[in-house]
């Protein structure tokens, strides 16, 4: 980043699962300018993920982080974290390095998905299965 370029200002977004057991705040550039990832792979479609990728230090849990349940599939490269009470899909964490990977914007309070800017990803056709057919 050059000296003339500034990092975008981070905006706090309060978030919670459906039942309210998991509460947290995510700081990212304003969703008015920031693209949200919409992927058509099986897990993103099933869970309704709309994803942003904050730095881990910009996600602060206020309650329920220790209660989250994990689900991994295919190559088991990531853990999908969800509330064990209401089933809300909260975030995805990468297993390597313990990094938080992606946060589900659908959990953000007062955000209207119809007004977001999207980056569409064809995960359905780009992410290979663990064992391709015929193997």
Image (cartoon, grey):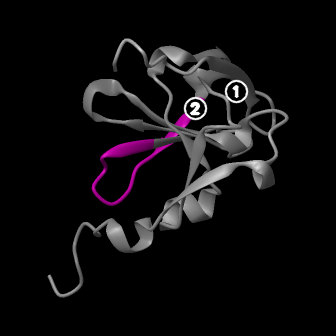
Q: Position of residue 128 (x, y in %)?
A: 28, 69
Report how far apart the C-alphas of labels 1 and 2 lie in the structure.
8 Å
* Residues marked 1 and 2 touching at CB (< 8 Å): yes
Query: Which residue is painted at 48% across and 14% down in the image?
Result: 57
Q: Position of residue 132 (x, y in %)?
A: 22, 77
The answer to whether residue 126 is left or right of residue 93 is left
Residue farthest toward the right in the current orientation of the protein: 110
**What segment is highlighted magenta in the picture?**
68-79
Query: Which residue is painted at 60% across and 17% down in the image?
Result: 9
In this orientation, which residue lies closer to the viewer: 44 or 88? 44
Image: 134 above or below 22: below
- The quarter in which the C terminus is drawn is bottom left
Look at the image and say whether residue 129 sits in the magenta stretch: no
In this orientation, which residue lies closer to the viewer: 84 or 56? 56
Image: 34 above or below 44: above
Q: Which mark is residue 68?
A: 2
Image: 9 above or below 74: above
- The quarter in which the N terminus is drawn is top left
Q: Which mark is residue 62?
A: none
Q: Position of residue 64 (x, y in %)?
A: 65, 22
Local secondary structure at mark 1: loop
Query: Which residue is painted at 37% across and 44% down in the image?
Result: 78
Residue farthest toward the front in the current orientation of the protein: 4
Image: 108 above or below 7: below
Residue that carries the numbered disc 1 in the rendered image = 22
């Amino acid at each position: 980043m050059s000296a003339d370029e500034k990092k975008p200002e981070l905006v706090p977004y309060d978030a919670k699962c459906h039942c309210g057991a998991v509460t947290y705040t995510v700081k990212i550039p304003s969703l008015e300018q920031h693209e949200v990832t919409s992927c058509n792979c099986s897990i993103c479609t099933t869970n309704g993920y709309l994803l942003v990728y904050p730095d881990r230090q910009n996600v602060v849990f206020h309650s329920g982080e220790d209660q989250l349940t994990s689900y991994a599939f295919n190559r088991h490269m990531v853990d999908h974290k969800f509330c064990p009470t209401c089933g809300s899909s909260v975030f995805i964490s990468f297993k390597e390095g313990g990094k938080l990977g992606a946060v589900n914007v659908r959990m953000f309070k007062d955000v209207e998905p119809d007004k977001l800017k999207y980056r569409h990803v064809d995960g359905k056709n780009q992410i290979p299965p663990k064992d391709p057919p015929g193997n």
